[in-house]
Amino acid sequence: MTNYKELADLLFPNIDKAPQFYEELYPPRDLKEGARVTRFAPSPTGFLHLGNLFTCTVAYKTARATDGVFYVRVEDTDQKRKVDGAVEIMLEGLKSFGITADEGVMIDGSQKGIYAPYVQSQRKEIYQTYAKALVEQGLAYPCFCSAEELEEIRAQQENEDTKGYYGKYARCRNLTLDEIKKSIAQGKSWTLRLKSPGDIEKKCYFDDMIKGKIEMPENTIDVVLLKTDGIPTYHFAHVIDDHLMHTTHVIRGDEWIASVPLHLQLFRCLGFKPVKYAHVAPLMKEENGNKRKLSKRKDPELAVTYYRQEGFPAQAVNEYMMTIMNSNFEDWRRVNKDADINSFPFNLKKMSVSGALFDLVKLTDVSKNVISQMSAEEVFELSNQWAEEYNEELAKLYGKDKAYATAVLNIDRGNKKPRKDIAKWSDIPDYISYMYDETFKENYDLTGNATPQLAAEVLRLYKDVVDISDDKDSWFNKIKAICEPVGCTPNVKEYKQNPDAFKGHVGDVSTVIRVALTGRTNTPDLYAITALLGEDRVKNRIENAIKHYEEVK
Ligand code: GLU
C-alpha cells in the first residue's frame, strides 16, 4: 500500500497543520551553554510520594545547578485515573519542600511560558498533527484489532521471547487502503500504531546519566501511539512534548528504562534530536538486613504527607534527601556549615545506580541537627504552623503567650553544643509539657543516690531559699549550700573519693529539684526552667513534691 497521503487524510480529516507549524511556534530556548532544561511530569492521580518528590528534586536541582529551566507538565492522558484537584495538591506539596516551577502549570492552575499548553489533554491537535505526518511517511498505521483479538495474539505468544504486536502478529500492519476504508466505513474504532523499523538482531545503545552505558535490543513492537479516542499514549506524548518544550534532560523513575529503545526510535522516526535520560532508581529501605523498595502499602513514610503530619521541617527532609542523593554532600556540608543548600554543586553522576537507602532514623538525626541550629523564633513559627494544622492543644498553649513559648524553646539554644531534643514538631508537646500546668505530669521517681527521705529534706530547705530573680551563680550557690545540711557534698570529686562518707553529692540534690519541678531526671538547663516557670509554679510544685515524699517515706 503506497498511498500514505490519502490514508493520512482519511484518518485525520480535521488536521490541517503540518509539524512545521509547531516547530516554528515553539522555537529553541535561548539559554547559556550547558544550561539544562528539566521537568516534572506528574499524572494527576492525587498522591505525591517520596519517590516523586525525590525524582522531582533531582530534576529541580539539575536545572538550578546549571542556570537552566525547570517546568511542570501535567500528563493527564489517562482520564480514568484522573483525580480532581490532584495537581494543586502535588504542587503545594512540592512548594512546601521549596520546589517551585519556572514555567508550566502553576499552583493556581494557570500556565506560564511560551511552550503552552503544558497539559497533555489540551494538546490533542499537536499529537495528531505529528501522528498524521508519520502516517504520510508510512511510519504509522491504524489497527482495528479488538480487545478479544489482542487477547488471542497474547495467547499465541506463550512461547515467544518477545511479546506484543509485531511481525507476523501485527495483523493490521499490511492492510490495504481499501480494507482500511471498509473498516472505517463500518464504524470500527482504531488505534494508531507505530510501524516499528526496529530489528531484533540490532542493539540500541545509550548513555544514561545515572546508570551509565546501556545496551538493549532495538524496539520491534508496533506500539500504540494514539488510543481509540485519539489521545496519545505516554510514549508518544513524551517524545513530542519533550521535543517541543526543548527539554534537554528527562529525569524520571527507572520503571521507564525498558522503554528507552522505543523512545529513541520514536525520536528518530519523528526526525527529532533525542533528549538525554537520567533514570532514578526507587528509594530503598533496609529491613532485617535486606534491601527492598519502599512500599505504599507497608511504609507510611512513603507518603509525603507523613512528613508534614509528623512535623519534620522541609529543610530537614531536603537536607537528608541531599545526603542520599549525592554521596559527597555530607563532606560539603561539613565544610560549608551555614551555606544555602542550593549552592551545593549537585551532580547527576553522583547518584546511586541501584537505589538510595532511605532511613527514617538517619532522617531523624539530620532533623535534630537542623532544628538545633534554628533560632527559637523560627522553631516557634514553624511548629506553630504545624500545630495549627495538626495539634490543637499545642496551638492553644502557644496562643496563651507567644513570648513565653518562644522563651521555653530558647532554653539551651545557641549553646556551643546545642541539645538535640526535637526531631520533629510532634516531639514538642512532650518536650515542653512540664512548662505548662495544663500538661505537667507529676512523677517523683528518683535516680542516683536520691531517696525519698533525702528529697524531702532537700526540698524543705530549697523552698525557703529559692528566688526566681537570682542570677545563675547565686542560684547554684544556694543549691550547693543545701548539700552539707542534708549530708551530701557539693563536690562531686570528693564524693567519688569517699562515697561512704556522704548521702550523695550536688548532682543528686539537683536531681531532686529537677524531678520536683519537671517530673523528669533529664532536662535542659534547670536554672532557665526555674526562672521561666516563675515563683508560684515553682513553690507549688516543690510543696506537692514534699507532700509526696513525706507520705512515702
Ligand atoms: N507521567 C509520568 C509518570 O507519572 C512521567 C514520567 C516522566 O517523567 O516522563 O510516571
Image: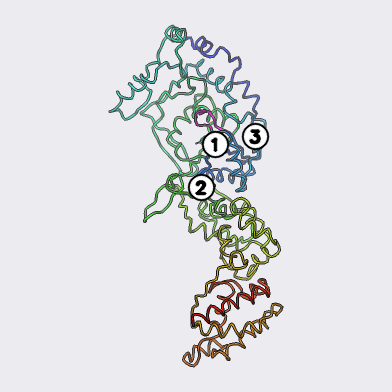
Is the CB atom of the residue marked by disc 1 within 8 angstroms of ligand 1's nearest atom? yes
Principal SS element in the magenta part? loop
Is the CB atom of the residue marked by disc 2 within 8 angstroms of ligand 1's nearest atom? no
Q: Nearer the viewer, mark 2 or mark 1?
A: 1
Tag 3: amino acid:
Gly
Closer to the camera in the image, 473 or 209 = 473
**Rounded to the nearest whole Å, what is the CA distance between mark 3 and mark 1?**
14 Å
Closer to the camera in the image, 516 or 419 = 516
Is the CB atom of the residue marked by disc 3 within 8 angstroms of ligand 1's nearest atom? no
Crowd class of label 2 (few under 14; some 14 to 19; many from 20; radius 10 Å): some
Please give the name of the residue rendered at 59% of the width and 71% of the height, measured from the top-left corner. 524
Q: Quadrant of residue 188?
A: top left
465 relative to 528, above or below: below
Sequence-wise, which precedes: disc 2 or disc 1?
A: 1
311 relative to 405, above or below: above
> At numbered mark 1, what does the secondary structure look like: helix, strand or loop?
loop
Please give the name of the residue rendered at 51% of the width and 80% of the height, measured from the top-left corner. 551
Residue 80 among those drawn in magenta: yes
Task: Give the residue pinned by disc 1.
Answer: 42
Q: Quadrant of residue 241?
A: top right
Closer to the camera in the image, 525 or 126 = 525
The dot on residue 349 is 2
Please give the name of the residue rendered at 64% of the width and 85% of the height, measured from the top-left corner. 478
The span picked out in magenta is: 74-82
